[in-house]
């Protein structure tokens, strides 16, 4: 079994910063990529940022220049600066993990952490 545990959400004023962290644990042979997605009320879940095991990053346009994704061993973080009210959402950690050498990669999700940007 694989678990993704997120931390770091909360309430912040516009223009403020937050850092989200996610750690993967359990039976892990390899991780292809990790990332962050978010879902605002009444909207579909959307990609925020991803990073491959080799360090290649991808960001949705609305967060470029404000958010930075980074990875470590079985972990990923998202530094969020210059936060805006429209960044308010539940943020989910995602990882593409192979649990055994003979497996294919599967998607795993964290439980989500609330980020609220409001004055």
Image: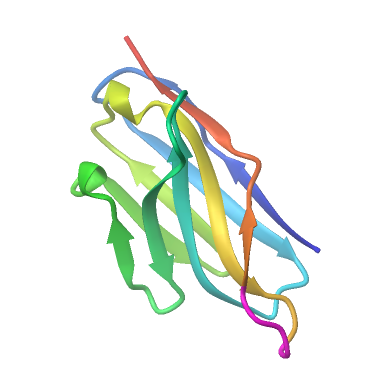
Where is residue 40? Give x, y as percent. 44, 29
The quadrant holding residue 113 is top right
Would you say residue 47 sits in the magenta stretch?
no
Instruction: Give the residue at x 45% y 37%.
Output: 44
The residue closer to the viewer here, 45 or 66, is 45
Where is residue 15? Give x, y as percent. 24, 25
Instruction: Give the residue at x 50% y 63%.
Output: 34
Instruction: Give the residue at x 32% y 66%.
Output: 57
**In the image, residue 111 above or below residue 17:** below
Instruction: Give the residue at x 30% y 62%.
Output: 58
Where is residue 85? Give x, y as percent. 30, 21
Residue 66 visible in rendering: no
**In the image, residue 116 above or below residue 70:** above
**In the image, residue 76 above or below residue 9:** below
For residue 50, side relative to residue 99 (left or right): left
For residue 18, side relative to residue 104 (left or right): left
The residue closer to the viewer here, 62 or 26, is 62
Where is residue 46? Give x, y as percent. 41, 45
Q: Give the magenta-colored segment's residue range.
A: 101-105
Residue 101 visible in rendering: yes
Give the color scheme: rainbow, by chain, secondary structure or one colour.
rainbow
The residue closer to the viewer here, 34 or 104, is 104
The quadrant holding residue 99 is bottom right
Q: Residue furthest bottom?
A: 102
Of the 4 image quadrants, the one containing the N terminus is: bottom right
Q: Main secondary structure of the magenta part?
A: loop
For residue 101, side relative to residue 115 (left or right): right
Q: Residue furthest top?
A: 119
């Amino acid at each position: 079994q694989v678990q993704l545990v997120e931390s770091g959400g909360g309430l912040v004023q516009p223009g403020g910063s937050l850092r989200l962290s996610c750690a993967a644990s359990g039976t892990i042979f390899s991780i292809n990529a990790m990332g962050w997605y978010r879902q605002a009320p009444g909207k579909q879940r959307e990609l925020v940022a991803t990073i491959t095991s080799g360090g290649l990053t991808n960001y949705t346009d609305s967060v470029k220049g404000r958010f930075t994704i980074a990875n470590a061993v079985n972990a990923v973080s998202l530094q969020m600066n210059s936060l805006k009210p429209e960044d308010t959402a539940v943020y989910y950690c995602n990882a593409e993990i192979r649990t055994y050498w003979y497996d294919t990669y599967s998607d795993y999700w964290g439980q989500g952490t609330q980020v609220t940007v409001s004055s």
